[in-house]
Amino acid sequence: MSSGRTMRIGEAVLGGSLFALAMLIAIDTMMAPSAGRGAVGPALFPYLISGGLALVALALLREAWSGHVPHEGGFELDVPAVLLVAGGLAAQFLLIEVIGWIPTAALLFAAVARAFGNRRTTLNLLLGLLLAGFTFAVFTYGLDLNLPIGSLVERLAPSE
């Protein structure tokens, strides 16, 4: 007689691997000489990523242990959506040095929103510009980390 609870090996391996990655990021950030000891600094985001990964890993391990997996029937891959997100990422990687962070992040935001089914491209581009501008300001002025402004923008508006 089975209790209906079986540990899911795949989810357990994935959860354990994510937890190990989270610990590696946290330890590597602690060991970095520029990590500093202030509350807000360059080490903040790696710690946030590490904490998020650890939470996801623990949730996966809990589901693996309980035997309940939400996708029991299997996955149905939405190929056009995956290609749209991959294309947005590729465009950002290829264009970020030329046109800078803000336009490429806005393009990526619009591509991901489209992949999730939102058809308001103009509104998504505007929201992407706002979010990218906000993150640019936070990184540049709050954390003193420079996101790429783009060689095209530097040619059009040279500094000093």
Image (cartoon, rainbow, N blue to C red):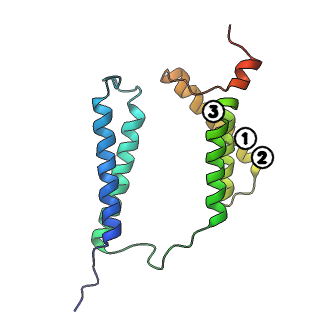
Percent position of residue 48, x then y: 39, 40
> Can you tell which of label 2 and label 3 is closer to the viewer?
3
Q: Residue at x 39, y 37 (%)?
A: 46
> Can you tell which of label 3 and label 1 is closer to the viewer?
3
Percent position of residue 21, x then y: 33, 48
Q: Residue at x 29, y 72 (%)?
A: 66
Question: For mark 1, what is the residue?
Answer: 126
Direction left: furthest residue: 1
Q: Residue at x 31, y 36 (%)?
A: 28
What is the secondary structure assignment of the residue under circle 2? helix
Q: Residue at x 70, y 57 (%)?
A: 118
What is the secondary structure assignment of the residue under circle 1? helix
What is the quadrant of residue 77 in the picture? Answer: bottom right
Q: Are marks 1 and 2 in contact (CB under 8 Å)?
A: yes
**Image quadrant where one finds the C terminus:** top right
Question: For mark 2, what is the residue?
Answer: 122
Disc 2 marks a residue whose amino acid type is Thr
In the displayed structure, would residue 147 be above or below residue 51?
above
In the displayed structure, would residue 135 be above or below residue 55?
above
In three-dimensional space, the C-alpha distance between marks 1 and 2, rounded to whole angstroms, equals 6 Å
In the displayed structure, would residue 108 be above or below residue 58?
above
In three-dimensional space, the C-alpha distance between marks 2 and 3, rounded to whole angstroms, equals 18 Å
Reading the chain from its start, which is encountered first: label 2 or label 3? 3
Looking at the image, which is closer to me, 47 or 98? Answer: 98
Graded by Cα atoms within 10 Å as few (under 14), some (14 to 19) or many (20 or more), the crowding at tag 1 reads: some
Question: For mark 3, what is the residue?
Answer: 101
Disc 1 marks a residue whose amino acid type is Leu
What is the quadrant of residue 17 in the picture? Answer: bottom left
